[in-house]
Image: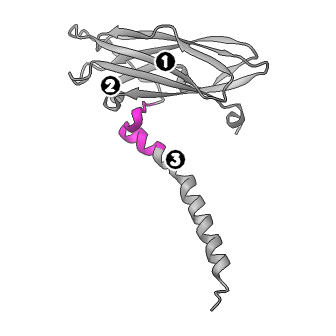
Amino acid sequence: MEDRWLPLKLTAMAVAGFGFAFSLVPLYDAFCDLTGFGGRTYETPVALIESAGDERTITIEFMTTVNQYAPYSFESEVRSMEVVPGKVYDANFVASNLSQSDRVAQAIPSVYPNKAASYLKKTECFCFNNQPFQAGERKDMPVRFMIDRDIPDYIDTITLAYTFFNIENTAAR
């Protein structure tokens, strides 16, 4: 027995599946922003109040990655630094547009271990905004941050990782 509605049902299922898959990205982003899962940090600056703390130190490691299709070089000036919770620090990153045309980039931050993301407070970060580059341009890009004094004792090393993406196609949208 032939079902006349089978092609319509199959098309509706395909459209529903595509819609569900398309909605997963914003749902995952919202979940990560709410929970800090995936090492996400808030992408808006916060006010830092430097406080005298104990002299416990935490190692901050900086990692940089460039998306495989992005025509940039991107690195931190230092691989790591020792910081005291409650004090404000600056780190500098350097990026260059290796192409012969103007580009727009965006850096996406991640923090590991994931639990440390809520204790890392940034007031200034190149990751807060898109970064326009002229052809061949090199930029110094600062990050100003503090580790909250309430960070658990078992966290002694934090990795702050950035992935640099070429976004000039999406920046105009």
Q: Is residue 130 visible?
A: no
The correct choice, above or below, for 167 with respect to 124 in the image is below
Q: Residues within 10 Å of mark 1 (few under 14, many from 20)?
A: some
Q: Nearer the viewer, mark 2 or mark 1?
A: 2
Q: Quadrant of the C terminus?
A: top right
Q: Which residue is mark 1?
A: 124
Magenta stretch: dominant secondary structure = helix
Q: Earlier in the sequence, mark 3 or mark 2?
A: 3
Residue 146 lies, in percent from the top left, at: 36, 16
What colouring style does the render use? Answer: one colour
Q: CA distance from mark 2 to mark 1?
A: 15 Å
Which range of residues does the magenta coloring cover? 29-42
Foreground: 43 or 94?
94
Q: Which residue is mark 2?
A: 119
Residue 65 lies, in percent from the top left, at: 54, 23
Q: Secondary structure at mark 3?
A: helix
